[in-house]
Amino acid sequence: MRKTSLILLTTFLLSVSAFADEGMWMLSQLKQLDLNTKGLQIKPEDVYSPDQTSLTDAIVWLGGCSASFVSDQGLLLTNHHCAYSALQRNASKSGIDYIKNGFLAQNRSEELPALGTNAYVLEKIEDVSDKILLSVKNISDPVQREKIVQEKMAAMEDEIEGNREDVSARVASMFKGQQYWLFVYKKYQDVRIVFAPPASIGKYGGDIDNWMWPRHTGDFTYMRVYMAPDGSGAKYSPDNVPLHPKNHLRISQTPLREGDFNFIIGFPGSTTRWHSSYSVAWSLQHRFKERIREFSEILQLMDDFGEKDPQAKIKLAGFHAGLANAMKNYQGNVDGMERTDFVNQKRAFEAELMRFINQNPETKGKYGHILTDIAEQYKHLEATYQRDAAVGNLGWLAGNMSSLASQIYSVAREREKPEAEREPGFSERKVKQAAERLQYRFLSFYEPFDKELFLRALQKAKSLPNDQKISALQPILSKQNLKEFVDEAYAKTKLKDPAVAKELFFKSTKELNALDDPFIQLAAKLYDLNQQIKEEKKSFNAHINELRRAYIDALYAWKGEGLYPDANSTIRFTYGYIKGYQPKDAVWYRPFTTLTGVVEKNTGQEPFDMPAKLDTLETTKSFGLWEDPQLHDVPVAFLNTCDITGGNSGSAVMNAKGELIGLAFDGNYEAMTGDWQFDDSIQRTIAVDIRYVLFLTDKYAGADYLLKEMGLGK
Amino acid sequence: MRKTSLILLTTFLLSVSAFADEGMWMLSQLKQLDLNTKGLQIKPEDVYSPDQTSLTDAIVWLGGCSASFVSDQGLLLTNHHCAYSALQRNASKSGIDYIKNGFLAQNRSEELPALGTNAYVLEKIEDVSDKILLSVKNISDPVQREKIVQEKMAAMEDEIEGNREDVSARVASMFKGQQYWLFVYKKYQDVRIVFAPPASIGKYGGDIDNWMWPRHTGDFTYMRVYMAPDGSGAKYSPDNVPLHPKNHLRISQTPLREGDFNFIIGFPGSTTRWHSSYSVAWSLQHRFKERIREFSEILQLMDDFGEKDPQAKIKLAGFHAGLANAMKNYQGNVDGMERTDFVNQKRAFEAELMRFINQNPETKGKYGHILTDIAEQYKHLEATYQRDAAVGNLGWLAGNMSSLASQIYSVAREREKPEAEREPGFSERKVKQAAERLQYRFLSFYEPFDKELFLRALQKAKSLPNDQKISALQPILSKQNLKEFVDEAYAKTKLKDPAVAKELFFKSTKELNALDDPFIQLAAKLYDLNQQIKEEKKSFNAHINELRRAYIDALYAWKGEGLYPDANSTIRFTYGYIKGYQPKDAVWYRPFTTLTGVVEKNTGQEPFDMPAKLDTLETTKSFGLWEDPQLHDVPVAFLNTCDITGGNSGSAVMNAKGELIGLAFDGNYEAMTGDWQFDDSIQRTIAVDIRYVLFLTDKYAGADYLLKEMGLGK
């Protein structure tokens, strides 16, 4: 594919101005998209309007996932994998395996608290660019500028949130700081699980099918959002009542067809569409290739424990799923980048850009330095990369004890700083929230694995090259028997007790030091280096951000067209069409899968272990209202050309009339470099068809009351 | 897929009379196929006629493969994998790796003798049913009947062949002995290799892509058939001259399109379309599942040796390819049979058949016993199955020494029998031929592997259950250290010298026994048991054959339609259409692959290690005359619905006008149970497109003289 794809890709990169239908657009950009000529059959104001009720009012952020209201009783649809942690926590707590068995509340009183889940309902979007940028108008040092911006953003957020637990404010930078937008959410803290299918439906195909088409996963879960009787987004209480959302989505009654116009409103997490070739090369090596090695070792470790102990499997399921998912993503990026020789293509593109820049003394003066400056930044980063990675690992890939101690010790140190020197994001309220969340973290704590992970991280640190050794750690690392040290540390630490750990969030460094806890001691030893690395990263980020902003400016100057900002977990709109694709020579993927396909894949073995009842429904053709008249089958999943990424999981997919037709839950493997470039010919959104969701609700679960609630009379 | 496929399959089995377009038809059956309404644009007599020149005169049997003449100078096209052993033998002999490098003769004097290859040109087809059946008219014992038939067939063959080296006669049983047909071939023993692409083209995709679509293998080789100046099919001599065949195929100049009518004339090896459910169950267990275990162990052994020693890899390449191919076939059969629950479906079908049979006292009397009798036969077979398999292995899966000794000792014993008691096939001429072929066998002899294989077979024999132990072997098997025994045997034997081994084919048993050779001794020990097993198999075959014949009779009585006989390496005709298929839910396979697809698959690593030159040709779009106007690319392989099986490899695929459009080289994985049932919706022939062959001949190899010879002026 090498050569052919190069040609395709060059064409793509050089025509960056002609966007086809790509883009994760800010809602404020909707009007420039001319959506009615593209196929939208309602007014763009019906999709989003700051002044009147619109479909956007039915869209919910779950912090990491997206969702939408489907009834006036706070009923919400999202992906099964977005409810996965909540199910797992309930399972750990109750001993009932809600992941394996699924869960259906027969009535509201049976609903399970979706432990750790908050529903954020957007109340306000405001362009605050002027306010933020005014404060840094005359500041040329990028680090200084960034610091002030961060402080300003945090202050703005704090001012709005005040001490209200149910308000969340976030200022987000767009186009690397060209614009700043404020998003204010009402935060509902009492979310409950209503109906989750068993993993043999909701995770059917598991890691094997993850990112793959054809897909047969029933990746959905119903939740319900509650509020206090006074309307506030209070924590769980039996007195709480279902939320009456401002709007909710109507379910489509029209069969989907190839070519149909679709759109999605959701919260895509992060893209890097406008990053330079240096960024690509760095990510390919460090973010993808090295992480793949790292994650596969850790996954293997978890598999080994899981085989020996079912409890380990349940406790580690969430972490396992997260790493496996990320690893497949990284591998897809490596495959895609290597196949298309993406680094060199970006370089060729940048050579073209430089030709444009250098043609004119003015553009040359403004942008001529960008690429060499970017290169310089990455050189700095490289010099201490291995050390930084090893230190980083001790904070998040070295088991819960190590990362918890690091978090606790940092909080204490931060608290003891003069207020002006503290991190902009620091507040006692946030510390309290972190301490509260600890209980969920402990549901995933499995000591034997935790120990192995810690040992592994220490060994990594021990094997660093001489010029990058962590001197503060040498007393530990020089021990003959690291395993012995680890065993002793776990035997001695008090952090394993959630109640103790929670209290430590409010202790002083002096009190912490007095504990003589091995993990706290380790955290204390690493603190200075961690701070130093943090400062170095801040400096890098501030500089690179400035350069990236200039890079986008140059693109504007060159191509003279509007762009959409990279994704950053703020609300976005994307549209496209139902469409198959050609994954390789002589193969055509059609855009619909069916229940027959679910049965075809069934082996009886996880992850292809469809419930027997589904087999019966298929054999007896008990499709009910959910049979597609052309497929003569229940549609399961579909493809469209919408432009999404991680964070969009659970997003409502709507048709030209704005009716709900499915829930986005994945992208396809062939387009896994999609965060770096959008390729219309192979990039697809994978969505679970709402008819499969309803078929399962109806025929599999017999949850008629949910159908009725959604206005689907039976 | 279970349930759905069951329904499909039942429908298929119950409509056995409605053949759609399946069938490997005898040439004498052509007229009943109404081919002109099916799409054939020439007269059926142009395809085959006993009286005048027809396309069939251009079709050649290579003994195991098929081929066709493409010039009046004896130029022949077949598959690369059909020339594989000949290339390997030349490589072993010369030290030049013709498999890796490929081979192109710049002129006739450079052509390489295709060691071990004979070209059989059909001269006569005759229905000899009456002659054969007359001799057994009044014989009711199936074993006796079969013996007489075999003798009669052999006598008929011998009479025609006489002592002529270049005539080969074969009488074949059709419909399990309902009919007998005589085929007389002229046997050309001087066949030479003209142009074989490197394995990186001719075996591109290797075992991974074997049986798979989409396919990108350039599976072709040109050979040339020579004759003595007097016209006889003499062995290689520099004085020989190219054969002027009676007819040769013209190359199509019309682009292929989906839906086009195609047909194939070739030599399919073996099918079992009309076998009973007992036969299916037996094969599933013993022929497929157990062999898969066995072969995968042996393949692993070869891989290990191949990694350590490149010589081992070359020498074992042919054996390795053969086992790997067979194993994938077996696995496909297991997958297909289990997926469709084929055994139970056959049983359901037979229950229907029995209902029909039992409705009427006459049919009940004639056929009522068939199935219970078949069951009885398989019960006998099962009782000694493990012993029989272990003894069998010592004859063919225990290394060359063991099988050679077994062959040599059997020949001596056979020779010493009174003529009337000998095997019908035995003749001194055939012994001589076997002795001659020994030289090729030794090119694949690699002692360390041979020893391991022998040891393995002895260990298998040792582990037999008590009631099936081989008493004659106990003195050997009871040794403490079997490995020591094997080492000593290989150190001592004289069979490793090809010249010595050749001579032994003409020794008496007394002389052989006097040699004190460990392998000859082993063969002698096993001889009686081998003979006993042979007699038991003969009895089983005679009985089962008779029952299968009755089974087919019953089918005739039930369905009242003509059938085609199971394949048996005799010449057959099959037709179909260019057509893609749906391998699974939401996936459609198109019927053409392209050069772009070859490049897509290229990883630079075997078996996806396309030559750099091909990359250049693709990048520069140097397609010449071989670009398809719709694909805008060079077509590589295509699919049609023709009904073929092993033995058809290398067969000419022709269009409606009888012009050559490609060479069949594989079937698709999804239809690997095709030998047991034909399913129009998923069974496909995979052929290399003649335009890819010509593109490579022209642009890759620059062999203009071959194009000219085929009438393709440049």
Image (cartoon, coloured by chain):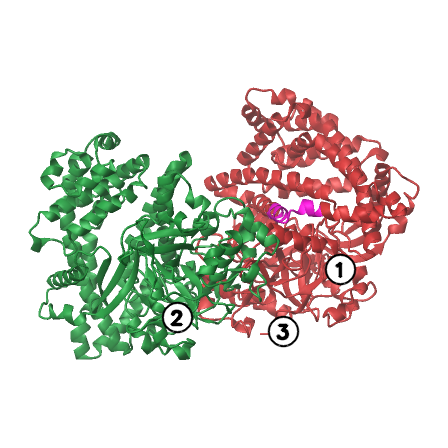
Chain colours: A red, B green
Q: Which residue is mark 2?
A: B575
Per the rendered image, the range of residues in magenta is: A332-346
Kindly identify the amino acid type of the residue bearing the numbered disc 2: Tyr
Q: Furthest-left residue in view?
A: B418
Q: Is residue A611 visible?
A: no
Contact? badges 2 and 3 (CB < 8 Å): no
Question: Which one is nearer the viewer's eye here, A416 or A365?
Answer: A365
| Rendered position, A284 above or below B429 | above
- The image quadrant where one finds the N terminus of chain B is bottom left
Q: Confirm whether circles 1 and 2 share one chain.
A: no
Q: Which residue is mark 1?
A: A18
Residue A635 is tagged as none
Kindly identify the amino acid type of the residue bearing the numbered disc 1: Ala
Task: Identify which residue is drawn at 63% across, 73% down.
Answer: A253
Q: Position of residue B385 (x, y in %)?
A: 21, 50
Foreground mark, 1 or 2?
A: 2
**Is B110 left, or right, of A209 in this rendering?**
left
Contact? badges 3 and 1 (CB < 8 Å): no
Q: Which residue is mark 3?
A: A254
Foreground mark, 2 or 3?
A: 2
